[in-house]
Amino acid sequence: MRLVCPQRALSRCFSSHIRFVLLRPVPFVLLPLLSSALFSLGLLRLSDALLKDNLELYTPTNARARAELRELGDLFHINDSDPYDMRRMGYIIVTAVDKGDILKAATLKASVKLWSIIQAITIDENQSADPRSAAPPIDYPSLCVRFPLPDSLDNAMSLLFDDTRHNRTNVPVEDELCVSNPLLELVKLLLDSSLKSQQILMDALTNNGAHVNGSISIDSSMAQLLNSLSLDALGSGVRGLLGGLSLEPDTRKIAGAKALMLPYALKHGTEEEEANAEKWELKLAQFLDHFYSPHIKANWWTYETLAAESARDQRRLRHWLLPCFASVSLLSVVFCCCSSSVFSRPLLALSGVLSVALAISAGTGLLLLLRFPLTSVVLAMPFIIFSIGVDNVFILLAAWRSTSPYLSFEQRMAHTFGDAGVSITIFCLFCAVTLLFCYVYQMTLFAALMNFTCLREVQQRHCLTMRKICRSSTKFGSSVFAVDKWAKRGVAPPLRSSHNLALSLFFRSHYAPFLLNKFVQSLVLFLFGFYLLISAYGCLNIEIGLEPLDLLPDNSNGKKALLEAEQYFPDHGGHLHVWMHNLSRINLGHRRLWLVLEKEIELYEHTEFTGAADSWLRVFLQFYHAKGQFTSTKNFVPRLKNFLKMKTHRKYRRDIRFTNDGQSLEACRVAVRLRFVGFQNQSRAMHLFRLLAESSELPTGVYADFFQFAEQFDALLPGTVCSIAVAGFAVVIVSLLLIPEPISALWVSFSTVSTNLGVLGLMPFLSIRLDFVSMVTIIMSIGFCVDFSAHLAYNYSRSDADDNEQQHKQQKQLTAEQPRNSGRNTVERMGNALYAVGTPICQSAATSILGVSFLAHTESYIFRSFFKTTVLVISLGLLHGLVILPVLLTLAHRKRSSSGANAENDQQQQITDCREGKWARTARDNRRRPNSANCSGTSAAEISAPLPHRADYFFPTASIFDQRHFAFAMTRTGPMLVSRETAPSLYSQNSTLPMGEREKQWNRVN
């Protein structure tokens, strides 16, 4: 079965294109250079277009969590004054150098000193040459978000402040304090206050009514304070900032802790505050990066950590671009050189790499000119484009090398681009803008440069000096080429100067017969089945999702801080926002609204991922219940408004919204503390909370900061499968259009599916998760994995198409020595296909792996995942292109061709019998005269067909030889190709001498 496909028309189009390039090569060199210079101006916007890395870049754009966040912000106006706004919040985790107790006096003093220095970090804003007009430096107290002290410590602070007011000490008295660790603030006050104040503070904290008589030192005061700390005295807010707590047996006293968290929060309500907060965090990171203490060490996480660490990785990656370019160039030069100075092509190899570099520059610059933003992941693009862009260079050079040296220069170039152009088209259809420029430049710039190089080769000039090389004439008569060997392959016998690569000869002469051995084929199919089973098993155990840790380099302090937070502060998981809206429109019948609200809130407090809720409703009910006042439907809203006016309850104002007339409750919010929500539990926790909200009898919404990250778990697998399906469908369509044989196109599509199945299945064994990085790489690599298979299948199918066309033309001219179905067998066809593309496939794989190998030197999981996935795709694509697909193609061809061969052999044998000895040949008309007595079943047209020329008869593609220099002569052993300079003209195919006389003269010559 053969469908009508545009392959031949496309091939003719490329042949016409290259003929046009040969006529005027200079414009095809200048235009790409000028366009590259023009488009590369967009690279000036590189720093402006590079987006700052944050978590939103790595979450789905249409995620449900983003809509939930917008709804939460619209209802309750979340900003920096909200205690649950985590945007500009960060923390420093302090641990002892010896991993011991952080609550020792020495380590606690060092922690207090560190926190004091952090609070004193300043940024200079609106600097002026006149010191009197310059604005004062901005420090943490002027940038911080302030909140009231926890209720558990308010009594102790009040006692201390009352005492200091009477004694007129220098301890500040404030209603609100900056976000910090309250315990550390108290220790700081303890170190700064008088001895009497120290005793009052210790009594309040330790619930000890007995005062210590006599003078005490600060160290003894701290020791007494630390030895008397208990869970009940600290409260939940302070306990959450101590990590790795250990308690004394049978008591609730704290025996020690492993880590201390120092949180902070910065105002960012305006653009000026946002800019100042960014500057302060960058300066904080710069200070902590050089901080040293003999007692403690600090790791930190700030809002700018991800962007700063990614920028550091980007700078490192940019430094590898030049070594990558040099390495790929060097390897390309090595692949394009041989022992002959004429047939070596080092300058052409450099031109091919240069065209790829110009394509990257032009493609990136064009997108930047069109105002497309850049992310850090895009920086991996040049490495992969450098690698795969050179692949087409090897394909074109292999196509040039496979052409006959006896053709004219124009014919060889036309055949080169006519054959290889289709293969390159199959590859480039699956790539983006930069690969589009690679495609255009290779068909213009590289084609024009290839014109000069190949013309130099034809003119026998040196590859570097361009000097004409003189060679002695070859004595063709001293060595005769056996034509029958090459006639079966349908290719020209190579000249000694053609210098075919040893690897290409190995593929044809040794590898193809070995691979297509029945035992080897059976072994390959068995191992292929085992490979599919392993891949399927891996797909069932693949890990999905990207951890926040993976966005940071391995040795970054931010990654260490996240690991320590997960280890020492599992309860420090943020808060879950639960809100009920449209309450004024809900008809609850005889039930009271606040009771239904309380019941709904309790549902969220009793899950495995949550703790207590900061419920305004519970505080409100307890407040009036303590006064003996009961709430009714009529007094609920007025009492709630009075409740919110109190100083101690102002923080709940933003959690409640009334209707426009102020008569009903419209919406309310409750913050529930999260705990034990690790990476593995995020998706499950998100679905649990949403299920509770959907099953509520009130319109309810939920949101937590980890929701956006957890959305990827639900989006990755369906998105990957859908994208692979769409890309696979495109592969099938393009393969059917451009590969002459439909069955080969289907096998190419099957190998693409098999390759992607192997990539997904082997990812768990290489510690690669299915995340957005690997998903993008897999989708992008569909074009890469189909590349090798498409080249092989195209050459194999094209060879079959050429054979069928030639056999169709010569169907009525075949003799007994060459029956119709005795053409090239499957092994020879596959050997010729491997001869044509085996070497460039190996070269392409080598340059691709070399180019992306520079990504392995980075500390980022993103780039390492990109490297591993790309190498995996290339390796599996190479395995399918050189091992699996040849076996599948030959098996399908044998099964398909064997059915029609038997039916034609009988008829062909009859025609052969009628031709053998049953006609008289005359030199005058060169016609066959049938003997009708023995050819009753054979038509006269079949028997009386004109005798073909011997060049066409013994060599179907003999037209590629220049008949001015070569001719065929018949000997006892068969037809031989000889030089017309050596053999007399009477040995040519047009000689009319009898056969016996020809042989006598032939023997005299040889």
Image (cartoon, grey):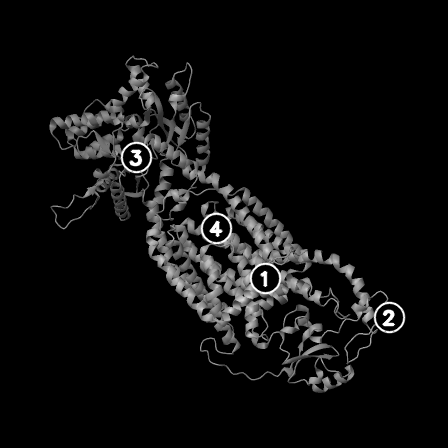
The three-letter amino acid code for the residue at tag 1 is: Ala
Q: In the rendered structure, are the residues bearing label 3 and label 4 in contact, judged by CB atoms less than 8 Å apart? A: no
Which residue position holds label 1? 9
> In the drawing, what numbered circle is on residue 777?
4
Disc 2 secondary structure class: loop
Q: How far apart are marks 4 and 1 (CA)?
A: 33 Å
**Pointer 2 with pointer 3, Cβ within 8 A:** no
Q: What's the residue type where badge 4 is placed?
A: Thr
Q: Which of marks 3 and 1 is nearer the N terminus?
A: 1
Going from the N terminus, do you reach mark 2 or mark 3 first? 3
Where, by quadrant of the figure, is residue 970 drawn? bottom right
Q: In this view, which residue lies farthest toward the right?
A: 933
Q: Nearer the viewer, residue 779 or 426?
A: 426
Q: Residues within 10 Å of mark 2 (few under 14, many from 20)?
A: some
Task: Answer few, some or many: residues within 10 Å of disc 1's Cα (few below 14, many 20 plus, some between 14 and 19).
Answer: few
Residue at the disc numbered 2: 932
Tell me if 1000 is positioned left or right of 779 in this view: right
Of residues 941 and 102, which is closer to you in this image? 941
* Mark 3 or mark 4, earlier in chain: 3
1 or 2: tag closer to the N-terminus: 1
Of the two numbered discs 4 and 1 on the same chain, state the one appearing first in sequence: 1
Q: Nearer the viewer, mark 4 or mark 1?
A: 1
**Is 969 on the left-hand or right-hand side of 10?**
right
Q: Quadrant of residue 176?
A: top left
Residue identifier under label 3: 79
Callout in the foreground (3, 4): 3
